[in-house]
Amino acid sequence: MRILITGSNGLLGQKLVQLITEQSRHELIATARGENRLPYEKGYEFESLDITNQQEVMDVVGKHKPDVIINTAAMTNVDQCETEQEDCWKLNVTAVDNLIEASKKQNAFLLQLSTDFIFDGEDGPYNEEAEANPVSYYGESKLAAEKLIIQSKIDWAIARTVLVYGIAHDMSRSNIILWVKKSLEEGKEIQVVDDQWRTPTLAEDLAKGCLLIAEKKAKGIFNISGDDLLTPYEMAIKTAEFFNLPQTTMTKSDSTKFKQTAKRPPKTGFILDKAKRELGYTPHSFEEGIKVLAEQMKK
Ligand SMILES: NC(=O)C1=CN([C@@H]2O[C@H](COP(=O)(O)OP(=O)(O)OC[C@H]3O[C@@H](n4cnc5c(N)ncnc54)[C@H](OP(=O)(O)O)[C@@H]3O)[C@@H](O)[C@H]2O)C=CC1
Ligand SMILES: Cc1cn([C@H]2C[C@H](O)[C@@H](COP(=O)(O)OP(=O)(O)O[C@H]3O[C@@H](C)C(=O)[C@@H](O)[C@H]3O)O2)c(=O)[nH]c1=O
């Protein structure tokens, strides 16, 4: 099948390109805003695509006629979404409508990436039927995108994920294992909260989950995350222990002391029964995920 991905320079985008080109079972069109920053040369076609540009979306999708579109592109800096709400909405919502229209025209299956931040975090972990109630503008934008997808007449799936970690080329933003490891190596003071709960997700597992959905054209909402429910503090301790780093500059904190611009939902995390049953999805444990990263760091 022909798969077109958006945001191919991003963390998930890069892992999807690596996975699909390694398996070489499908034709791949990798699209990204601006230039191709991928560290892979072959096995895919590249197209520059700004998904907020409706004409560009129609032209690129019309030219390549993909069977499946995987939309990974988004404004993923949660605090930036809180302060730059117009740009957040343009990218996380209006651009999704562009992709829906193009999917309708080309009869393509659209897989949209979504998040645990559509929930308020009062009673996680969540299954796919839980009631959404976002506490940040980022969460509101991702929920609005889900609603556009669900009420559209196209064939669609939504893959929801949580706190993605991994290492990729030329990354736009860091993630928890990397910033904890770097801070402790540099002896930098960090406060890490222990009153938020997540099921952190190895980027490679998320890519595999997305490909399972795409290959089966499995319709509906799927939770695709890690299986271990951990606090950021527990994740930081596990990271320090794995890399044998001193913990002296790390202080346990909580959300009353550690302030971020956008509110974070306290207890999220996902229940994975549906993805395991219907897709055969099998994520790494958090410890195994750290090991995968450590191997990649050696290269
Ligand atoms: N990371 C996480 O913890 C989680 C992520 N998700 C969701 O998963 C998806 C992928 O996340 P992740 O890979 O981490 O995100 P990244 O921030 O790593 O990648 C997002 C990509 O979108 C690109 N982009 C920005 N604007 C546009 C545009 N106008 N047109 C096309 N592409 C654009 C960015 O380009 P550039 O590189 O040039 O900035 C970037 O490469 C997102 O939808 C996110 O909401 C859900 C839960 C958790
Ligand atoms: C930076 C930082 C974060 N934290 C905690 C807060 C939070 O619970 C966790 C991660 O914080 P960050 O701000 O790095 O990441 P955050 O923006 O919370 O990550 C979110 O990204 C978007 C895209 C999603 O969709 C969500 O699933 C989630 O992954 O670590 C600390 O405790 N200390 C720190 O210094």
Image: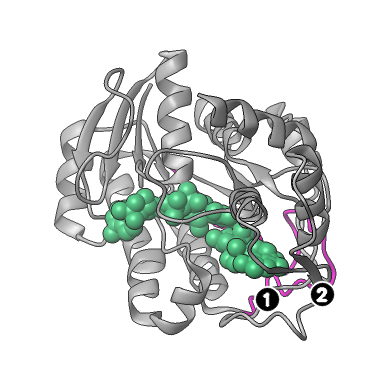
| Of 17 and 193, the residue lying toward us | 193
Point out which mark residue 122 bears: 2
Are the residues tagged 1 and 2 within 8 Å (C-beta)?
Answer: yes
User: Residue 113: in sight, yes or no?
Assistant: no
Q: Name the residue tied to disc 1.
A: 133
- Magenta stretch secondary structure, dominant: loop
**Whether residue 52 is situated above or below residue 185 in the rendered picture:** below
Q: Is residue 287 magenta?
A: no
Residue 102 image point, x, y percent: 27, 49
Q: Which quarter of the picture shows residue 43? A: top left
Q: Marks 1/2: CA distance?
A: 10 Å
Q: Secondary structure at mark 2?
A: loop
**Whether residue 42 is situated above or below residue 229 in the rendered picture:** above
Identify the residue at image location x=81%, y=46%: 238
User: Residue 11: in sight, yes or no?
Assistant: yes
Look at label 1 and name its amino acid. Answer: Asn
Identify the residue at image location x=22%, y=33%: 46
Q: Quadrant of the N terminus?
A: top left
Query: Along the horizontal axis of the image, is 280 left or right of 88?
Result: right
Point out which mark residue 27 bears: none
Identify the residue at image location x=32%, y=62%: 95
In what quadrant does ligand 1 lie? bottom left
Q: Nearer the viewer, mark 1 or mark 2?
A: 2
Residue stretch in magenta:
110-135
